[in-house]
Amino acid sequence: MFLDLRDVGVRYLGSKAGHDAVCGVSLSLSAGQIGVLIGPSGCGKTSLLRAVAGLERLAEGSARMDGRVLADAETHVEPEDRRIGMVFQDYALFPHLNVRDNVAFGIRHLPRAECEQRVQEVLERVGLAHAARRQPHQLSGGQQQRVALARALAPRPQLLLLDEPFSSLDADLRERLAQDIRAILHQSGTTALFVTHDQLEAFAIGDVIGVMHRGRLEQWDDAYSLYHRPATRFVADFIGHGVFTRGEVVTTADGPRVMTSLGALADAAECPLPGAYPNDQCDVLLRADDIVHDDDAPVRACIERKAFRGSEFLYTLRLASGEQVLAHVPSHHDHQVGEWIGIRPLVDHVVTFEREPGQAAPPDSGR
């Protein structure tokens, strides 16, 4: 593996064990791969990024890049010696320098002709060769971020770190720029580790994504697996739109099933077996795309809230049992809040967890 972190811990002065910024994180990236760290504020993702950069010392564990030890119990390579580039939230462009001089700043030690060639090369790669003589204030936010990326790429870093680089941009521009930068990084063969709080941004740019919570890495996986096969209850709750409903694992003539207020759920590959949970009671993750609006369905649900999303509504629904589910419904199905509609489950992946204390068995389905 090109980047390899093993049992990494970061502890700030005055913190106590169990309240470390980062605790026991292990992850790896292959050469040319883009990794993304995502999680709520204060979960440790930026602290981990700073530790990889060498801006924070490891309290425990080790960090290696391309087989070289960057940090462990005996070693701490200084940031300037790690061959790691970094792109910050605020771009950190020099306002008194034009685009060309900003990009050239980190490679001024090169012979003039080589420096000019490299600046031209990276500006062409980010689509800003035409803006080389402009000042930063003459550029849009997205263009300024591309200049910051070009400047970070100019010294040919072995690893590029990006700390919420799109946070000041509007949502549409963030998603477009994430896709553009993914293409740029892959074209240049650059290995990158990216921090964001935006799930769509993470899905757009990441080959592999890590969900962090309270300093720990809950899951390090591709986007599809995070969404459909979450490893922990936190990941299941954090990623996408979904709720937990009560379920019971039962044996039928057709094999194991999970009984819920919406009916029986089955997944030949992943349905839990009887005995997997105490008293066969479990909590079932139901995504908004697991629930289908069907006027002929026997199960009815009351619309409590609706959010217009253009091509669809996100309905918040209350079952007769009192349980709540979410559903994506095409926007031409414009039902009113308080209306009862028919719904049915269409679940390809049955995702279950041990029942949280204090919940009763599921009631019969229907209104």
Image: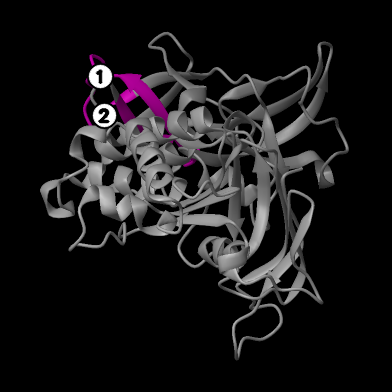
Horizontally, is 143 left or right of 265 in the view? left
Total number of numbered discs in the rendering: 2
Horizontally, is 242 left or right of 166 in the view? right
Does residue 2 sit above or below 98 in this rendering? Answer: above
Name the spot of residue 66 as percent of width and height, x first.
74, 48
Does residue 75 sit above or below 268 in this rendering? Answer: below
Looking at the rendering, the stretch of residues picked out in magenta corresponds to 313-340
The picture quadrant where one finds residue 23 is bottom right
Question: Within 10 Å of the Cα at label 1, are there few (<14), some (14-19), or many (20+) other Cα atoms?
Answer: some
Residue type of the residue flagged with mark 1: Ser
Residue at disc 2, secondary structure = loop
Whichever of labels 1 and 2 marks the residue nearer the N terminus, that label is 2
| Most foreground residue, 309 or 292 | 309
Determine which residue is flagged by label 1. 331
Q: Quarter of the image containing the N terminus?
A: top right
Determine which residue is flagged by label 2. 309
The picture quadrant where one finds residue 120 is top left
Does residue 317 sit above or below 150 in this rendering? Answer: above
Which residue appears farthest toward the top when viewing the image?
296
Of badges 1 and 2, nearer the viewer stands 2
Q: Quarter of the image containing the C terminus?
A: top left
